[in-house]
Image (cartoon, helix red, strand yellow):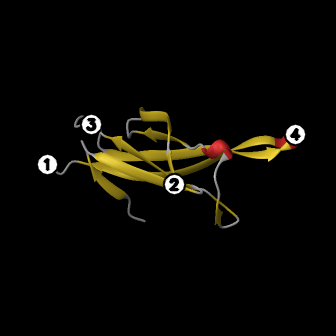
Amino acid sequence: MALDKYERGNTIKTYVDFKMSGNLYDPSGNLAWIHVLKSDATYLISGESGIRDSVGEYHYFFESADDDPLGIYIVEWYGYHDLGGSFGAKKLKQRNQIEIVDTSG
């Protein structure tokens, strides 16, 4: 599978769909957060709140700087699902990778 590539120094839109049994659903409180881990294992962003588009669908815009490292970045979305009773809340996670490239030649 080829990674989506984005040029360093630009704004990137990322999104997530949370599903349960094939149907879209919202995490508890309609809240989803995002981490973006750079290729040098440092965070570009951490714990930012995503923007809810509709049931189970969230997005977030982030920017990479002109001097951010090139390579594969990990985008991790997470939220919580309340299982109720003594089970409490379970953390939901979805990860994907993107590649930050330099096309300035």
Mark 3–mark 2 distance (CA, rounded to whole Å): 23 Å
Q: Nearer the viewer, residue 71 or 32?
A: 32
Label 4 sits on residue: 86
Q: Which mark is residue 49?
A: none
Q: Earlier in the sequence, mark 4 or mark 2?
A: 2
Q: Earlier in the sequence, mark 1 or mark 2?
A: 2
Observer-side mark, 4 or 3, equals: 4
Label 3 sits on residue: 65
Mark 4–mark 2 distance (CA, rounded to whole Å): 28 Å
Label 1 sits on residue: 104
Q: Of the residues shown, which amino acid type is indicated by label 3?
A: Ala
Asked if the residues shown at circle 4 and circle 3 are in contact, with their CB atoms under 8 angstroms apart, the answer is no
Observer-side mark, 3 or 2, equals: 2
Outermost residue on the left side: it is 105
From the top left corner, tell me how far across and down residue 5 is, in percent: 31, 56
Label 2 sits on residue: 16
- Helix, strand or loop at label 2? It is strand
Q: Of the residues shown, which amino acid type is indicated by label 4?
A: Ser
Q: Quadrant of the N terminus?
A: bottom left
Q: Nearer the viewer, residue 90 or 71?
A: 90
Q: Quadrant of residue 84?
A: top right
